[in-house]
Amino acid sequence: MLSKKAQYAFRALSTLVRADLALRKEQGAVNPTPGEHPVAISEMVKEHPMSSKFLETILLDLRRGGILGSKKGKGGGYYLLKHPEDTPLAQVIRILDGPIAPLPCVSLHFYERCVDCNEAVCGLNRLMSEVRDANLAVLERRTLADLAVKPGQPLGQAQR
Amino acid sequence: MLSKKAQYAFRALSTLVRADLALRKEQGAVNPTPGEHPVAISEMVKEHPMSSKFLETILLDLRRGGILGSKKGKGGGYYLLKHPEDTPLAQVIRILDGPIAPLPCVSLHFYERCVDCNEAVCGLNRLMSEVRDANLAVLERRTLADLAVKPGQPLGQAQR
DNA sequence: TTATTTCCCCATAGGATTTGTAGGGTTATA
DNA sequence: TATAACCCTACAAATCCTATGGGGAAATAA
């Protein structure tokens, strides 16, 4: 299950994606520079009610994780460093929740050897690798851009 | 990530699967009645070192969950109620870890409404349903029988 | 009948993790 | 200079995970 952190992160990110879309539309530019329109925590919380202090720690993680940039002082806030379709959901989840794999011994980014389990003999290993791959097939393909797709509309089948 | 409980469960179950296979081979029967050869906790722990008291609570959960049967007294123990290929991994995980879905609001067996989240508008909903389906495609197809497949050997592609 | 073996059940303790809070510091703008 | 906003660390509260302990009930064997 996704942690509250990850859930809140996705809510806040959806606000940033919409801000990015609005900016692109307004500018009429196909590929504008990101970062022109930071959104303050207070605005995100207005849209998605939650503890602003808690959200703050989440946004800091996302910034350190290379997904967001920030601007200090009045008029400041957070903004996407890349275009929404360039940030897969997997990256967000790894930053906030850690491994996506169901076992440490089959994790690509957070590998740890199993204790009391000989990997060469362990039957679970291979099965959980399958699960991991099935997850990644979705989470590496779907991006922040998909977060903003309204329920009526179809999701892209093979973006990028 | 799978809990320790689920991991221990799979280790113990792999012992029971091998016992079942050995029994079928010995009997030469294609479809023998299960339950003829219970395995005691002490034997499982001998094969997979872990706290036997902790394993006990796990096995009780599996019994209540309809996967195992038990026999008391000397010569007693636990045994599979069905043939290994008839118990999908998903069933084991649901018993010990609860929902497989990444969000309560997309869970098939443990559905709960999202708080502070309008499902009709929430963009995450649909994406996480995709993740759930990808998981289930593996976890409902793979069964306890696959647990006993040695690493060299190929897994079945479409059992049943 | 008695002893032994094994599963059955419940309560709870200890630790880890998650979730959230507090408070002050730094930077940018007006 | 005042204000708005992000930055950082520590910690508190709640929850969940992991495991343990002790006694009870049932089956078997002597």
Image (cartoon, coloured by chain):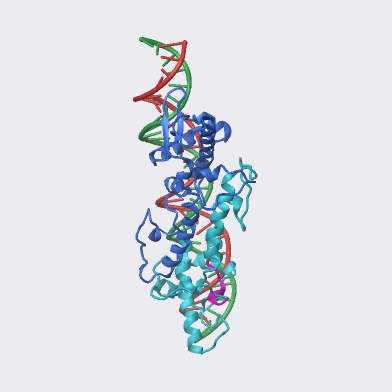
Chain colours: A cyan, B blue, C green, D red
Image point (47%, 24%), residue name: B75
**Left or right, A104 with reference to B116:** right
Q: Is residue B110 above or below residue B53?
A: below
Residue segment shown in magenta: A82-89
Q: Is residue B32 above or below residue B158?
A: above
Relative image position of residue A98 (x, y in whole percent): 55, 58
* Position of residue A48 in the picture relative to residue B154 (left or right): left
Residue A155 in sight: yes
Q: Nearer the viewer, residue B88 or C10?
A: B88
| Residue under the point 44% across and 32% down | B35
Residue B157 in the image: state x and y as whole percent.
Answer: 54, 53
Q: Position of residue B81 (x, y in %)?
A: 42, 37
Residue A69 visible (yes or no): no
Of the pair B56 and A71, the residue shown nearer to us? B56
Q: Residue furthest bottom?
A: A28
**Residue B27 position (above or below residue A152):** above
Above or below, A121 against A36 in this view is above
Instruction: Tell which of A14 and C28 is nearer to you.
Output: A14
* Residue at point 59%, 70% (across, down): A66
- Give the image location of residue B107, x and y in percent: 40, 57
Q: Is residue A13 magenta?
A: no
Q: Quadrant of the C terminus of chain A?
A: bottom right
